[in-house]
């Protein structure tokens, strides 16, 4: 699902491109994005939440390393 969150750019054209890059249908991508929002309570339509999803897998595992 991380790939789906990367494709969550606003606009239908961006979703079509994101779906094509992941070789899934646009409706599948929409479902995954909606599912991510339901599970996390975050809105991938906002820049702040998209940045958080982009940075989360790249962040150190332990907060004590900061």
Image (tube, grey):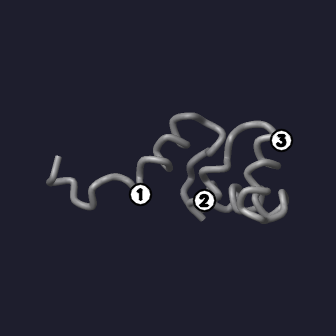
Residue that appears at 68% across and 41% down: 9
Q: Is residue 19 left or right of residue 51?
A: right
Helix, strand or loop under label 2: helix
User: Is the Cβ of the residue at disc 2 closer than 8 Å to that at disc 3?
Assistant: no
- Residue 40 at x, y = what percent? 54, 57
Q: Which residue is mark 3?
A: 12
Residue that appears at 46% across and 45% down: 52
Residue furthest top in the image: 47
- Residue 53 at x, y = what percent? 50, 50
Q: Is residue 65 left or right of residue 4?
A: left
Where the N terminus falls, by quadrant? bottom right
Residue that appears at 76% across and 42% down: 14
- Which mark is first along the chain, 3 or 1? 3
Question: Residue 24, relative to residue 44: is it above or below?
Answer: below
* Cα separation between marks 1 and 3: 26 Å
- Residue 33, picture quadrant: bottom right
- Residue 27 at x, y = what percent? 84, 60
Question: Residue 33, relative to residue 10: is it above or below?
Answer: below
Q: Which residue is mark 2?
A: 3
* Cα separation between marks 2 and 1: 11 Å
Q: Is residue 12 left or right of residue 32?
A: right
- Residue 30, picture quadrant: bottom right
Q: Which residue is mark 1?
A: 57
């Amino acid at each position: 699902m991380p790939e789906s969150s990367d494709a969550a750019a606003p606009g239908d054209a961006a979703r079509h491109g994101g779906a094509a890059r992941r070789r899934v249908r646009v409706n599948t991508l929409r479902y995954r994005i909606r599912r991510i929002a339901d599970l996390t309570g975050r809105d991938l339509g906002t820049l702040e939440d998209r940045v958080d999803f982009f940075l989360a897998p790249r962040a150190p595992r332990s907060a004590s390393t900061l």
